[in-house]
Image (cartoon, rainbow, N blue to C red):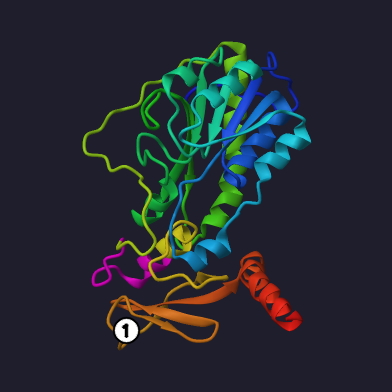
Amino acid sequence: MTHGVVFEPGEPPPCRLRVVFAGMDGRFSTVPLQALARRHQLVGVIHSLPRPVHRGWLVDWARAGAGGGNLRRFAEHLGCPFFSAGRSAGRGLEAFLHRARPDLLCLSNFSFLLPPEVLEIPRRGAINLHLSLLPRHRGPNPWLWMFHDQDRTGGVSVHLVDEGEDSGPLLGTLEHEVPEGITAGELADAVLPRAAALLVDVVDALAGGNLVPVPQACPDGMRRARFVSPGEALIDWPTWPASRVSHFLRGASLWYEPFPPIPGFVRRYGPTLPGKPEDPPGTLRQAMRTGWISCCDGRVPFRLQAVPRELWRLGLPLAVGAGLWALA
């Protein structure tokens, strides 16, 4: 860690800061939130509305409400105010922060940049937990591009928030391995507790006033870890071996779908199957619940996994319609 300050798990911080936490639904935000709540005083939770992704009206309907509003439930459990913010929140977000009177604003998996007038409200500024070794993979989707680029070493960075995108001075970092074939869920199991502990260490050190920020390097030509559209061509099918395709899809399937999605189901990709297939690279073969993708030197198998919540949303209108028809 760049700051070199580590507190023992049971040792209280030098002082408890008043913290407003901001993120999105899902454990990329809730794991750090829970860790902070055990050490400091949470005085507000801000929910960031996710970027809309259009996959077709049927899939969008099935997946509506993913995440279940768990940041709101955490705020209710902690007994602190809650605010849901979009890019146009503006004055409402400023007013919320003025009422909370935070010492510090902590972000993790937040979906848009904050203006200077918001960053100036917390007494000690704002910090962000970013899931890459900055400045590599700056942007909203670092893990997708980490898997795409076959990085075998990833990391976590905590940095001061400025007007740029993940460009503020570093306060703490850690490295982790990215084993071949690991899924995003498996990697999150291993990394998120360590990332949350790093964030807490940084906040503790800020409370003690003994943390020196380290400016980031500014390399030229570094690609932004941008969002991609479902089905966007990110795989070079004629040249990518099956092992690379499998590693990418197993790791990035939370954020990227190279083929049209099936409402109510997700594809779970497996290790490569040897043997050059007869189909051209990039061909998808689908059976009832399983299938594979042809690559230049093998196949990548997958199975369809049902998503009960999505199937329920798809079946509910049909059930209501059938009931009304029966009553007519």
User: Looking at the image, can residue 9 be seen?
Assistant: no
* Residue 78, picture quadrant: top right
Amino acid type indicated by mark 1: Lys
Question: Could you tell me which residue is drawn at 54 percent across and 21 percent down?
Answer: 94
Q: Is residue 244 magenta?
A: yes
Comparing 25 with 225, the one in front is 25
Q: Over which residues does the magenta segment extend?
A: 234-246
Residue marked by disc 1 = 276
When the figure is inspected, residue 18 is found, relative to residue 306, above or below; the finding is: above
Q: Residue at x 33, y 86 (%)?
A: 277
> Residue 65: horizontal and vertical position, in percent?
60, 54
Image x and y of residue 187, in percent: 54, 52
The residue lying furthest to the left in this view is: 220
Q: Is residue 197 above or below residue 255?
A: above
Crowd around label 1: few <14 · some 14–19 · many ≥20 (10 Å): some
Q: Residue furthest front?
A: 328
Magenta segment's dominant SS is loop
Q: Secondary structure at mark 1?
A: loop
Figure check: 272 above or below 234: below
Residue at figure coordinates x 63%, y 20% from the top left: 204
Image-quadrant location for residue 112: top left
Q: Quadrant of the C terminus?
A: bottom right
> x and y percent of residue 98 in the render?
60, 16
Left or right relative to 171: residue 137: left
Q: Is residue 233 visible in this depiction of the protein?
A: yes
